[in-house]
Amino acid sequence: MNRITNCFKKIKNEKRKALVVFITAGDPDLEETKSILDIIDDSGADIIELGVPFSDPLADGPIIQAASLRSLKSGTTLKKIISLVQEIRKTRDLPIVLMTSFNPVFVYGEQQFVEDAVFVGVDGVIIPDLPPEEAAEFSVYAEKKGLDVIHLLAPTSPDERIRMIAKKGRGFIYYISLTGTTGVRVQLAEGLGDKVASIKQSSDIPVLIGFGISNPDLAREATKFSDGVIVGSAVVKLIESNSDPIQRNKKLAEFISSIKQAISDPC
Amino acid sequence: MDDNTKSMELPDAQGHFGPFGGKYVIETLMPALDSLERLYEEVHNDPKFQSDLKYYLKEYVGRPTPLFFAERLTKHLGGAKIYLKREDLNHTGAHKINNTIGSALLALRMGKKRVIAETGAGQHGVATATAAALFGLKCDVFMGEEDIKRQALNVFRMKLLGAKVIAVTAGTRTLKDATSEAIREWITSVETTHYIIGSVVGPHPYPMIVRNFQRVIGDEVSEQIMEIEKRLPNLCVACVGGGSNAMGLFYPFVQNEKIRLVGVEAAGFGIETGKHGATLSHGSTGVLHGMMSYLLHDDDGQVQEAHSISAGLDYPGVGCEHSYLKLTGRAEYESITDEEALEGFKLLSHKEGIIPALETAHAIAHVAKIAPKMNKKEIIVVCLSGRGDKDVNQIADRMEMGL
Ligand SMILES: Cc1ncc(COP(=O)(O)O)c(C=O)c1O
């Protein structure tokens, strides 16, 4: 049984949009990540995206770069993140997706990674620097073991790539809302609606929008033409600027609930 | 077809050199890489593009560069005959401009009005800024804060040439993070900007394109040495940072197995200290900056800091074709410490009146080690990749003589 597919089935039945929340695992440390995950789940997130820290995260802007660094300083490794998921699974059942640069997975061993991830209850993986052209073997193995390889599309993707990637994608399509790195933005990119509409025509799986979705208004706007949003940098920034865990958890709950509220208006 | 003939035909259509190379980048950049690949294929066989390139290399860069017999150095070392391929005599003082002229012409073909580059030693930054000025392109160069300090002369040159130098304060503050930041900028501006990578690194088709723009080094050597010595060299030596001057020298000789190819990496403070840039000698396979290649990284896949006295060799990655040449055994890779490089720097200055770049000094230092062990009839060609003006202040500080 696939948690991601089930989750989207449920969301569709409820006629609402999906909320995916990204945090960097191990920021500020893995113990805190556990309590942050509880708050995120309880505040109404549908899917958790756990970022694996990397020394050179090329697709990330300053906020998530800094989180990656804090996480590495606190001793986080991919192995420890996989153990963390095993811990979380004792109490939580929402879909968990790992977002990671390819090198940590490559060094871990691609097959070993897939096996361990599936064993502890990871449902999907997003590897931004592993495009379908390089992912063939990995994807076959992941599919065999039941790990969804979630692919990305971008504003620069031409039609033929949209068709190719829509076919290969599993779980959902991650549409990068803008030509740029992750970060907090104040408005949506021009032409976003048209692009997402054309992707939805090619895709049987949900299309979610990420990168730059940083407040309830943008989230509401983005869900007008997509199946949901991924909120990352805004959450990571909130974690960064609240060192007191109690205060932080309170603000996290408020922020995530406010996004959830914004995208839950009947549509 | 034997292995070495085959390797002349690499990369394959997907940009792989055996297990290395490829395109490990975010989707946003994939379409730009695809169109660069198509454009390059087009111009590669286009006589107009090739004649433009030839014109600028001859009349502007000053090619062909001499192949100079280093007679006093040869005598001093008492072994093989040593020839210097004088890339330091190119306009701007290093081999980097062979690539930037070609790449700027590509940018013009694409109708892109802005170029960006990363730089370590500043030579690639200067060469990019120069080509941008020549062709009227806007130019931004990413450079680590640490390198801005140690290569101040080149920072000033870039500014004089009208380029903007953007200080990178993240991570190591050297070439690795300058490259990361340039890639991030390219992700943001890919529709209007061409990224000119400074070595045979990055996602396909960059390693192939840069190699092909740099092979002029080896092609000229091949002709020149036949004319002077009526035969080919026994050994080619070049320093390896990303590996572009080495690939440029090696590539035309890859098929001829009688010719030994030796790349010289930075051993920094010494391999045993862990502070070095000897990626091929002491790294393992990994993915950084868009390609699969040898890499200095830990067992969690985190990239490690490199160290070298020379900013241009201070990099934890290396060109994917070198990884392939190492894997097949066609080329060998050695390393030289900071201290040894300084000796090489002084040696060439004293014996030949040529002050080499600190990067190049690594190749010289290696030649000083092996030439005495070779037969007097044997011939070594060493790529004198750049001149040392940029390093004089740094070395003066170190020698505590002040300038
Ligand atoms: C003079 C000189 N030689 C060598 C290098 C190293 O680059 P590569 O290995 O690509 O030739 C540099 C890089 O900055 C350089 O300036």
Image (tube, grey):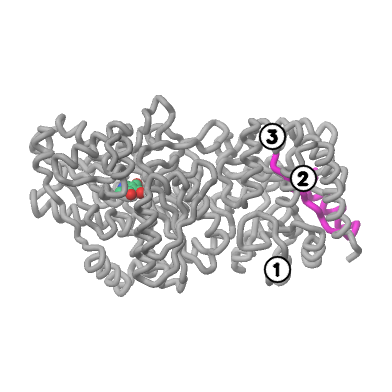
A177 over B225 or under it: above or below? below
Q: Nearer the viewer, residue A166 or A224?
A: A224
- Label 1 crowd bin: few (<14), some (14–19), many (20+), radius 10 Å: some
**Residue B180 counted in the magenta span:** no
Q: Residue A48 shows which numbered tag?
A: 2
Res A19 seen here: yes
Q: Which residue is rendered at x = 40% and y = 48% of the image?
A: B120
* Viewport quadrant of the C terminus of chain B: top left
Q: Which mark is residue A81?
A: 3
Q: Is residue A21 magenta?
A: yes
The residue marked by circle 1 belongs to what chain?
A
Q: CA distance from mark 2 to mark 1?
A: 24 Å
Q: As rendered, which of B142 and B1 lies closer to the eye?
A: B142
Q: Residues within 10 Å of mark 3 (few under 14, many from 20)?
A: many
**Amino acid at dot 1:** Leu
Judging from the image, mark 3 belongs to the subunit labelled A
Q: Calculate the distance from the C-alpha at mark 1 to the C-alpha at mark 3.
A: 34 Å
Under 8 Å from ligand 1: the CB of mark 1?
Answer: no
Work out whether mark 2 precedes mark 1 in sequence or the reverse, and give the earlier one: 2
Between residue A229 and residue A95, name the one nearer to us.
Answer: A229
User: Residue B37's quadrant in the figure?
Assistant: bottom left
Q: Amino acid at mark 2?
A: Ile
Is B399 displayed left or right of B162 in the figure? left
Q: Residue furthest front?
A: B402
- Which residue is drawn at the image coordinates 83% and 55% (left, top)? A259
- Do discs 3 and 2 share a chain? yes
Mark 1 — residue?
Answer: A192
Q: Which residues are magenta?
A: A1-25
Going 46% across and 36% down the picture, which residue do you hit? Answer: B296
Q: Residues within 10 Å of mark 2 (few under 14, many from 20)?
A: many
Q: Secondary structure at mark 3?
A: helix
**Residue A227 higher or lower than B354, as above or below:** below
